[in-house]
């Protein structure tokens, strides 16, 4: 698999994990990721993220959202 394919696979896994953790649909999670440019964040951090588990990557995503002042629980309403 190419690196671009691996990045896409990671982005997909983390979106699914976020949907599960946040108790929302994959579609809603995907919209949040798009709205806050989190797919680019994962792509840009792939060099480090590929050595971490998906849970750690999602923790980093949540930290980015927190730093942007985003309350995920408000976003998912």
Image (cartoon, rainbow, N blue to C red):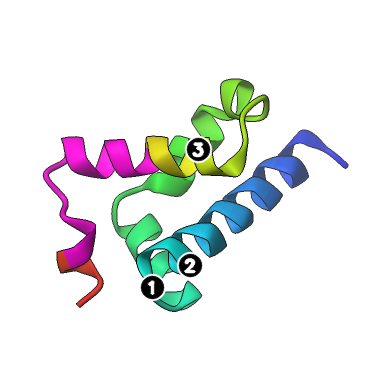
Whole-angstrom CA distance, mark 2 to mark 3, is: 14 Å
Q: Nearer the viewer, mark 3 or mark 1?
A: 1
- In three-dimensional space, the C-alpha distance between marks 1 and 2, rounded to whole angstroms, equals 5 Å
Label 3 element class: helix
The kind of secondary structure the magenta stretch mainly shows is helix
* Region of the chain picked out in magenta, as a range: 61-73
Q: Position of residue 2 (x, y in %)?
A: 83, 38
On screen, residue 32 above or below 65 = below
Query: Of marks 3 and 1, which one's residue comes earlier in the chain?
Result: 1
Q: Nearer the viewer, residue 45 or 25?
A: 25
Residue drawn at 15 percent across, 66 percent down: 74
Kindly identify which residue carries mark 2.
Answer: 20
Q: Is residue 11 left or right of residue 37?
A: right
Which residue is at 74% across, 42% downward? 6
**Foreground residue among 63 and 5:** 63
* 1 to the left or right of 13: right
Q: Is residue 37 left or right of residue 8?
A: left
Mark 2 packing: few (<14 Cα in 10 Å), some, or many (20+)?
Answer: few
Residue identifier under label 1: 23
Q: Residue furthest right?
A: 1
Secondary structure, mark 2, is: helix
In what quadrant of the picture does the N terminus appear?
top right
Q: Which residue is mark 3?
A: 57
For this view, does 11 lie left or right of residue 40? Answer: right
Q: Are marks 1 and 2 in contact (CB under 8 Å)?
A: yes
Q: Residue 31, position in %: x, y?
A: 37, 68
First-in-chain label (2 vs 3):
2
Disc 3 to disc 1, how far (Cα)?
18 Å
Q: Residue furthest left?
A: 69
């Amino acid at each position: 698999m190419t690196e671009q394919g691996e990045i896409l696979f990671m982005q997909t896994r983390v979106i699914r994990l976020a949907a599960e953790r946040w108790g929302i649909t994959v579609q809603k999670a995907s919209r949040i990721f798009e709205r806050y440019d989190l797919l680019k964040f994962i792509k840009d951090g792939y060099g480090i993220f590929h050595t971490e588990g998906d849970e750690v990557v999602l923790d980093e995503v949540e930290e980015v959202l927190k730093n942007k002042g985003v309350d995920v629980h408000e976003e998912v309403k």
